[in-house]
Image (cartoon, grey):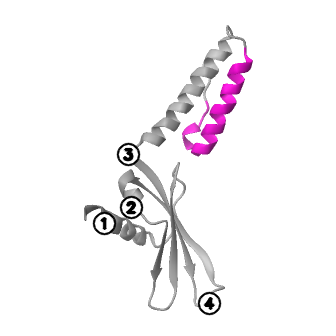
């Protein structure tokens, strides 16, 4: 018997940890000689390997979220969300918040964080993501 979870690589790391705990619990309930116990153990091992691979990987997914602030403090909206796969040492150099000021007194506020899986890119201003990354790479080389 072989068990598979379709799309487990697209789950967040926290969801994978909960899944491992549930599989462990199911495995403990079953009798030792059960063929289902072995299949659940193999499945738990596959999920654990995916989690370990994410933790040890030299590359990580970074999420860049930009929100635009208008001429008054009441104007604020999300203008985009982008994902880039970067080396872990460059990702660690990135700030968690970055503000880009325009000459007309508007700003783009950037929220940057590491995520487990890539989401869907949206919006404009993606060239600013590349500028933020290049500044971090320059800081790494200094």
Which mark lies nearer to you, 1 or 4?
Answer: 1
Q: Which label belongs to residue 93?
A: 2
Q: Earlier in the sequence, mark 1 or mark 2?
A: 2
The residue at 70%/26% (across/down) is 25
Taking 67 as reference, is 13 above or below it? above
Q: Which residue is mark 3?
A: 58
Are the two marked residues, 1 and 2, in contact with CB atoms closer than 8 angstroms? Answer: yes
Per the model, the C-alpha gap separating discs 4 and 3 is 42 Å
Which mark lies nearer to you, 3 or 2?
Answer: 2
Where residue 6 sits, quadrant-wise, is top right
**114 or 10, which is in the foreground?**
114
Is residue 99 among the parts visible in the rendering?
yes
Q: Which residue is mark 1?
A: 139
Per the model, the C-alpha gap separating discs 3 and 2 is 14 Å
Q: Residues within 10 Å of mark 2 (few under 14, many from 20)?
A: some
Residue 110 rendering spot, x and y as whole percentages: 50, 71
Q: Which residue is mark 4?
A: 72
Per the model, the C-alpha gap separating discs 1 and 4 is 34 Å
Are the two marked residues, 1 and 3, in contact with CB atoms closer than 8 angstroms? Answer: no
Q: Earlier in the sequence, mark 3 or mark 2?
A: 3
**76 or 25, which is in the foreground?**
25
């Amino acid at each position: 018997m072989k068990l598979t979870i379709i799309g487990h690589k697209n789950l967040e790391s926290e969801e994978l940890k909960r899944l491992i705990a549930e599989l462990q619990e199911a495995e403990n309930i079953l009798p030792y000689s059960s063929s289902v116990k072995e299949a659940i153990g193999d499945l738990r091992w596959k999920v654990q390997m995916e989690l370990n691979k994410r933790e040890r990987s030299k590359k990580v997914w970074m999420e860049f979220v930009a929100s635009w602030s208008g001429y008054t403090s009441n104007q604020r909206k999300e203008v985009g969300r982008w994902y880039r796969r970067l080396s872990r040492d460059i990702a660690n150099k990135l700030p968690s918040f970055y503000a880009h000021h325009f000459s007309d007194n508007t700003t783009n506020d950037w929220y940057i964080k590491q995520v487990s899986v890539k989401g869907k890119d949206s919006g404009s201003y993606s060239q600013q993501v590349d500028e933020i990354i290049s500044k971090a790479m320059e800081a790494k080389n200094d």
